[in-house]
Image (cartoon, rainbow, N blue to C red):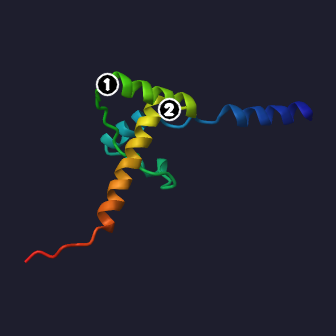
Amino acid sequence: MSERKNEYFMKNTLHKKKPASAESIARMADNGKDVSRFFTNSGRMMKLIQRVNVDFTAPMLEELERHARELNISRQAVIKTLIRQGLDQRHLARASRPRVKRS
């Protein structure tokens, strides 16, 4: 009986399907097939990432590198964080300014 039990459990583990790749889901959607079963709406949409090139002076780059080492994070993470903080600060400053009515 134990052999039979093991055989039953082995069959169940062998027939599990791999999750579909994004490419295969896209292909099915392009072919007009219903792909709604692949989406649970439990995730979040990722915004498009666009690469940019930025030039830094050598001293500024050294300062960014030093800051990244101190925080034990990548230089890119430092740059993104500082830019986000600057944009947030600018947004808050604009929001707190009194509005001037123009005639």
User: Along the line of sight, which residue is nearer the eye, 19 or 17?
Assistant: 19
Q: Residue 67's mark? A: 2
Secondary structure of the residue carrying tag 2 is helix
Where is residue 65? Give x, y as percent.
47, 26
Q: Amino acid at mark 2?
A: His
Kindly identify which residue carries mark 1: 57
Instruction: Please give the name of the residue rendered at 26% of the width and 72% of the height, measured from the top-left corner.
Output: 98
- Name the quadrant of the C terminus: bottom left
Cα–Cα gap, marks 2 and 1 = 15 Å
Instruction: Please give the name of the residue rendered at 11% of the width and 74% of the height, measured from the top-left corner.
Output: 102
Q: Residues within 10 Å of mark 1 (few under 14, many from 20)?
A: few
Q: Looking at the rendering, which quadrant does residue 33 occupy?
A: top left
Q: Residue furthest front?
A: 59
Q: Residues within 10 Å of mark 2 (few under 14, many from 20)?
A: some
Q: Amino acid at mark 1?
A: Thr
Q: Is residue 2 above or below residue 88?
A: above
Instruction: Describe residue 91's horizontal placement relative to residue 79 as left or right.
Output: left
User: Is residue 34 visible to us here?
Assistant: no
Q: Looking at the rendering, which quadrant does residue 91 occupy?
A: bottom left
